[in-house]
Image (spheres, rainbow, N blue to C red):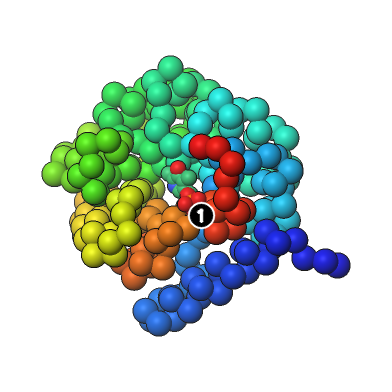
Amino acid sequence: MEKSWIAANLEDVKARVERRCLANGVDPSGVKIVGVTKTLTAETAMEGIKAGLTDLGENRVQEAARKIPMVTPRPRWHLVGHLQKNKVKKAVEIFDIIESVDSLELAQLISMRACEEGKKMETYLQVNSSYETSKHGIDPGEIYDFADKINELPGLMVSGLMTIGPLTEDPDLIKKAFAMTKNLFDKLQMRIGGGFGVLSMGMSGDYELALDYGANALRIGTAIFGPRSKE
Ligand SMILES: *Cc1c(COP(=O)(O)O)cnc(C)c1O
């Protein structure tokens, strides 16, 4: 059987992950790869599943609502983009994990909708590690207070921390953001305790650096699926 180029790309990413983990003395089997399929077709997403991906990510609710029913067998679907309040109901319906919880108001809405659906929504907190004001995410200085409040919401299960590295070619800036995020993650783990264990950090351009700082979930689009035609 001929292997798809998507499968070949995924194999390459996995080999790099393994090499980096071994160099860091970390078990590579603890690292989850989430294939980001935004702007791509359901067929392409299914190629990713065939190649071995168990988790896929989308950044827009409307696009995901069209795509998700067409993708079989169903992977675990992650929302990785900013969630608008008027899309919370739909997002709670269609996603398995919301990685982009970035305000208390949003968290409360998600919890309310999840309770209505009779479920606990798995969520990650998103931290703004690059201090870029254009980026979504909770301010690092506010995250402990935020975590305490959100931990009390009945419809949420907070299982991880997510960040988007700074958009720069300067590895030192990226490392700084990842190191800071890892530090927050460790402290949150002590604070939140059981069930909190995912550090979602690293994309196609910076996932090897992210692994150096303890990432155990990588969100990878172009390195697996090739360049996107539109954003
Ligand atoms: C698009 C996107 C990714 C994947 O980006 P690539 O550079 O293509 O790997 C990861 N995380 C988020 C939040 C994204 O929007």
Residue 214 percent across, percent down from the top left:
34, 66
Count of numbered labels shown in the rendering: 1
Question: Could you tell me which residue is drawn at 38 percent across and 55 percent down?
Answer: 201
Looking at the rendered structure, the kind of residue marked 1 is Ile
Question: Could you tell me which residue is drawn at 56 percent across and 74 percent down?
Answer: 15
Q: Is mark 1 within 8 Å of ligand 1?
A: yes
Residue sitting at the far right? 1
Horizontally, is 152 left or right of 71 in the view? left
Horizontally, is 144 left or right of 164 in the view? left
Residue 16 percent across, percent down from the top left:
51, 73
Residue sitting at the far left? 141
Query: Compared with residue 2, is residue 53 higher up or lower down, i.e. above or below?
Result: above
Q: Quadrant of residue 151?
A: top left
User: Does dot 1 land on a helix, a strand or a loop?
Assistant: strand
Question: Could you tell me which residue is drawn at 13 percent across and 44 percent down?
Answer: 141
Q: Nearer the viewer, residue 199 or 230?
A: 230
> Is residue 112 at all visible to an observer of this figure?
no
Q: Nearer the viewer, residue 60 or 226?
A: 226
Q: Quadrant of residue 84?
A: top left
Residue 24 percent across, percent down from the top left:
37, 79
Q: Quadrant of residue 177?
A: bottom left
Residue 63 percent across, percent down from the top left:
58, 29
Query: Compared with residue 36, is residue 8 higher up or lower down, i.e. above or below?
Result: below
Question: Could you tell me which residue is drawn at 59 percent across and 32 percent down?
Answer: 64
> Is residue 130 at all visible to an observer of this figure?
yes
Horizontally, is 163 left or right of 7 in the view? left
Look at the image and tell me in which quarter the N terminus lies. bottom right
Q: Residues within 10 Å of mark 1 (few under 14, many from 20)?
A: many
Residue sitting at the far top? 86
Residue at which label 1 appears: 220
